[in-house]
Image (cartoon, rainbow, N blue to C red):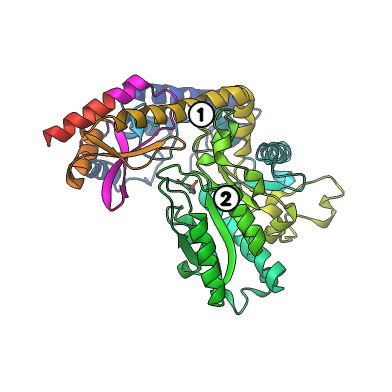
Amino acid sequence: MQKPKEGYFFLTSESQSKEEYKRIIQKTTEAILDSFKDGTAYDGMNPFDLKRTIHTPHLLPEQGLGFDEVLKKMKETLLPNFLRTSSTDYMAHLHSPALLESISSELILSTFNQSMDSWDQSPVATEIELEVIACLCKLYGLGDASDGIFTSGGSQSNLSGITLSRDWYCLHRLGHDVKKKGLPSCYNKLRIYTSEVSHFSVEKSAHLLGLGYDAVVKVGVDDLCRMDVDALQQLIEQDKQKGLLPMCVVATIGTTDYGSIDPIEKISALCKKEGMYLHADAAYGSGVQLSSTYAHRLGNLGLCDSLTVDFHKMFLLPISCGAFLVKDAANLEAFDLHADYLNREEDEEDGYTNLVGKSLQTTRRFDALKVWMAFQVRGKSGYASLIDTCIENASYLYEKLMVNPAFEVAIKPEISSVVFRLNASCEINKLVRRKLIHQKGIVIGQTVYAGKTFLKFTLLNPLIDHKKLDELLILIEALGDEV
Ligand SMILES: Cc1ncc(COP(=O)(O)O)c(C=O)c1O
């Protein structure tokens, strides 16, 4: 077997290794830059051709091809087919472009490859995560006893919140320790209330936690797609009469399609009265907290027992980057478990903090670095101006749609998503979306509202301006007339 060249594997203190690192990063950067040829979001192959190109029998050749050969292949066949999230023609999902400084953070965090489970795998990273979490707890007003942990995103944060709600409810209301004894015998009576337009990760979590989809009670919404608190109260009352056990409410602070915001103050008051846990899924809306103009729209998130925050949505940081915050740090004990090899007994007196005890994950990325860097690079006002632009773009688009009889709007946006349709058949609306992606390189969203197909602009890119929105509406109208 051929002995590999010195420095071929890792970045070390050897000069040859440093040269190779620099060369690889430089070549990769050039390849990425070359692939940004025009402003479109997608000018790659259609799904069938792409499948044929990617699926080859040569993924694991007998002899390695070397970096340069593989990068060449990547340049020719993969990079031209990537979706470009920074394009102002991309607005399909809660999926953002990545701020430039966060690319630098990603490079640093993968080069050093720290793991957040124990201090001896991530000394500075552990301290940075603690620092960022403390800053977030303050930002959302969670109080002195609060704490949190970085997660892979909204789904894991929601699963964490619902897990804590189950353990908290069973321990404090039923005197049953789930962590030790598993589910109580009345497990199938536990109920989770969430709006009918909340994220599907609530149901997924109920399944994973052994409670099942039936434990999730869907609450109706008002004309702005916000949870109807009177309906919530009635459902809780009815369930209590049936002998069921209302355990928690999952409020949504920015629903996936509409950006609608559940009224947290009213829901919190009801949870307190009923002795229920309140988790808020602010995967989408959490970014709005940085805006001095619009933060009030979220309500007082400091009232929640736990909170989902996503940085790979409005905060414009690369996937993955999320946080799970709790009002009472003691509740995080649910995830603590001693492992001889990770969190040794003497660690505390040696000043080590091992974050594994607060997390569902063991090995975990140093995603907090991206927040640490972006917060300081942009500052609160820099971030606020990005977020305000997106919210104002949504209001502008809404006003334009409302005065144009060719269109119908689902609801008035509260954050930065606008759901609308051409006043035409569902088939025409679907065709327009398809034509936009495959003929024009423009990627927009599609959903169903009141049984009809709607189009969706998820406006997370602050580079989108009014002119762009005007042009897109003209184009959509023209495409609708064409089909
Ligand atoms: C409201 C809401 N909650 C949770 C999630 C799940 O977040 P993630 O994709 O980061 O797991 C999403 C995803 O779009 C969402 O819109």
Magenta part of the protein: which range? 442-470
Question: Badge 2 local density, few (<14 within 10 Å), some, or many (20+)?
Answer: many
Residue at x 49% of width, y 64% of height: 216
The x, y position of residue 269, in whole percent, is 63, 54
| Dot 1 alpha-carbon crowd within 10 angstroms: few under 14, some 14 to 19, many 20 or more | many
Note whether residue 33 is visible: yes
Helix, strand or loop at mark 1: helix
Magenta segment includes 166: no
- Please state if 184 lies on the left or on the right of 281 as rendered: right
As drawn, the residue found furthest toward the right would be 349
Residue carrying label 1: 387
**Image coords of residue 322 (percent x, y):** 57, 43
Judge from the rendering whether residue 35 lies leftward or rightward of residue 97; answer left or right: left
62 relative to 339, above or below: above
Q: CA distance from mark 1 to mark 2?
A: 20 Å
Check disc 1 and give the amino acid type. Ile
Q: Is residue 445 left or right of residue 271?
A: left
